[in-house]
Image (spheres, rainbow, N blue to C red):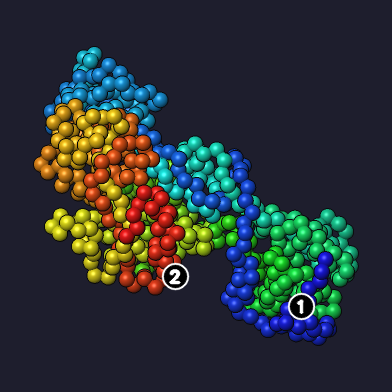
Amino acid sequence: MTRSSPPASHPRQGVGQDQFLTVLSREEALARFQAALFPHAMPSEERALADALDLALAEDVVAPIDVPPFDRANVDGFAVRAADIASASEANFVSLSLNGETIACGTAPTETVETATATAIATGGPIPRGADAVVMVEHTQPDGDDSIEVRRAASPGQFISYAGSDIARGEVLLRAGTLIGAREIGMLAACGVAKVPVARKPRVAVLSTGDELVQPGEKLCPAAVYDTNGAIVSAAIAENGGEPVFLGAIGDDEARLEVAMREALAACDMLILSGGTSKGAGDVSHRIISRLGQPGILAHGVALKPGKPLCLAVCDGKPVVILPGFPTSAMFTFHDMIVPVLRRMAGLPPRTETQVTARIPLRIASELGRAEFVMVSLVEGEDGLVAYPTGKGSGAITSFAQADGFVRIDALADHMPAGAQAEVTLFTPHLRVPDLVIIGSHCTGLDLVLEPLSRAGLTARSLAVGSLGGLAAARRGECDLAPIHLLDEKTQSYNAPFLSEGLELVPGWRRMQGIVFRPGDRRFEAKSVEDALAAALADPACLMVNRNQGAGTRILIDQLLGQARPDGYWNQPRSHNAVAAAVAQERADWGVTIAPVARAAGLGFIPLAEEHYDFALVSTRKERPAVQAFLKALAAPENHAALEKAGFRPA
């Protein structure tokens, strides 16, 4: 092997009374170390789910299906039309005729829920055509063999989880760098994903140096000490995503140590030694490093207490670290300086504390008499951490997987007030507050713009709370950007009329909205919007699916319908994917969604209007590095091409 000469900035010096080279600040030493290492190719491999635990994803994983894949019941009861039981109460029963089927999990409905009828349904059962709510069995009583009496009214959508309400097909399910735990495995399994690409654990060689070292279990000779660092460092490597390869202890023999170091670097991704960082006559490790590859030693002496003798080097792309000999100093410097690099090589997020204090931005209702644990996602607000509740219902997998931790509401409290300071217990000690926070309306196009940020090592958190919820969060300073698509009826313009002081509009992209239908439906096939709408409204059997109030699409639908309220109007799922699923699965005949979703679902599409999906930017956050990176990615030609390929039109 060719031996490299020492870097000019680190001249060879004699042994004996040498002093440390220039002592660097912690920040400067770490910056030099990371600059010489990254970007760093991350070795990856494909693993079955059962073998992927505690590994980091090497690539984004996109959801191949909607979860749930159909509208489903959240309780045991009866699928009904909410309008039929609007007057129901304990004093005013409403009688409904029972249809001739009972829907259980795995049972496909065959009968339509007509006016004044109901279908028995079990928790998890698919909602039949015509129904827009589920009434709990506890709120009914039998009325003969073929009918029931309902004692409580139901609102449209009650006890229904809509298709794609948990996970939408085509959205990024888990991002590259996500540490795979039980929650993530649950998300992947729910989408039918059997194998995932993961970052291979970096192999880290561990060598202890010094004539005085004896391995635990061996006889301790006079003036000798047990090798504590070898065991401690190996365990800490395993805790932080590496695969330790302990090579034992080697005495202060320069030739023998050099052979061991070269063999270790040839077989492993990283080499960590302990001891041998000082300038005594017997400390030779630092001299060997200068012969192992470029750029060599980057820092030898760091302004840390304890930990000043730390030596950081990179030899031909592989990190080499010499920790101080004393165990306390070794572990302090390892966790402070080496763990960030090791975890990054392993594709893992940085470590942090296990409990943090955060402000609750919204009132969280709770049930008296029960201690409640509410899962939250953490973002950085103007005055500290903000904990956003992430619940989507008891059947949602993402609530658990996307949360950073939970807050506890006492059994004697019926709510946690907005603005309260709460202790958040973290699920893992590896919390990293995201570099970029986006709160508002979700779009699969957003994943395309965020991908370059992820590759650059920036973390982004996107919370889907709707356009109006995003604007409220932006006004409170809880996010950097709020995606919105709101049409102002007076001006017939998108988004700009809804901005307030302190917010500015960043153009995003255009999404074609249109009427979706099943191919071959003569009421819609090859017709204009006007003719298709007229045919739909003229046919009493033509069932629509709507969108939730507050959605930009809902505003468009209401303008389209005017005063008309066709059957299915009160069926109000909260996503484009759920609308497409309802039509594709024949629970509705038409609805309004965006072209990319219609295309993915194989539906017919009649263009209606081009929707503006833009971003409300918090002006005071505009100069943040992550925001600038997002704006740059948004304007990049390659991202424009990706958006166009996905069916969007960049602004």
* Residue at 60% over, 40% down: 48
Quarter of the figure that contains the C terminus = bottom left
From the top left corner, tell me how far across and down residue 353 is, in percent.
52, 61
Observer-nearest of 123 and 494:
494
Label 1 sits on a secondary structure element that is loop
Reply above or below: 346 against 49: below
Kindly identify which residue carries mark 2: 625
Quarter of the figure that contains the N terminus = bottom right
* Residue at 39% over, 54% down: 643
Label 1: few (<14), some (14–19) or many (≥20) C-alpha neighbours in 10 Å = many
| Amino acid on which disc 1 is placed | Pro
Mark number, residue 6: 1
Q: On the rendered structure, is 42 left or right of 473?
A: right
Task: Work out which residue is located at the far top of the displayed protein and give it.
Answer: 145
* Residue at 83% over, 55% down: 217
Label 2 sits on a secondary structure element that is helix
Q: CA distance from mark 2 to mark 1?
A: 36 Å
Observer-nearest of 462 and 89:
462
